[in-house]
Amino acid sequence: MTTPPAGISEADWAATPVGVKAGFLELVSQCQRQQQEIEQLRIQLTALATELAHLRERIGRSSRNSSKPPSSDGQGFKPPELRWSGFSGQAPSLTSEAGYRP
């Protein structure tokens, strides 16, 4: 390389041993490759972060907080418990779980 890299004077570059020049140029090349890889990884990270946000949104949806039917909630989701509120004006039912009335 006859032209010195940016920031190095022609006199300094001319006085630099050939082996040092070769090592320097290899390091510059390596830095350029790493910068390209970093940019590719940033793009990949952005895509994965977007996908993660989408998946977190999907996993947080249920029939309670969206228009999805209850059958799409999956096995790990418990339906709300039905409780007698006591405000209907009627006494609680005397039927057993099987529906038998004494």
Image (cartoon, rainbow, N blue to C red):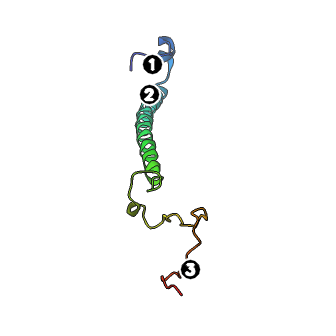
Residue plotted at (55% across, 76% down): 93
Label 1: which residue? 5
Q: Earlier in the sequence, mark 3 or mark 1?
A: 1
Q: Residue lying farthest front?
A: 89
Residue 6 at x, y percent in the picture: 46, 16
Image quadrant where residue 32 sits:
top left
Instruction: Specify the amino acid type for callout 2.
Output: Leu
Which numbered disc, 3 or 2, marks the residue that appears first in the sequence? 2
**Dots 3, 2 in contact, CB < 8 A:** no
The three-letter code of the residue at mark 1 reads: Pro
Label 2: how many residues lie within 10 Å, few (<14), some (14-19) or many (20+)? Answer: some
Considering depth in this image, is 88 or 66 the residue closer to the camera? 88
Residue in view at x 56 percent, y 79 percent: 94
Callout count: 3
Work out how far the residue at label 3 is from the one at label 1, CA to CA, in angstroms: 93 Å
Which percent across, then down, holds residue 50?
A: 43, 42
Q: Position of residue 96 (x, y in %)?
A: 53, 82
Q: Nearer the viewer, mark 3 or mark 2?
A: 3
Q: Is residue 70 above or below residue 43?
A: below
What residue sits right under mark 3 in the picture?
94
Q: Which residue is mark 2?
A: 25
Q: Is mark 2 in CB contact (under 8 Å) with mark 1?
A: yes
Quick one: label 3, few (<14), some, or many (20+) residues within 10 Å?
Answer: few
**How far apart in space, not on screen, are marks 3 and 2 (Cα)?**
90 Å
Say which element carries label 2.
helix
Of circles 3 and 1, the one toward us is 3
Residue depicted at 44% across the width and 67% down the height = 75
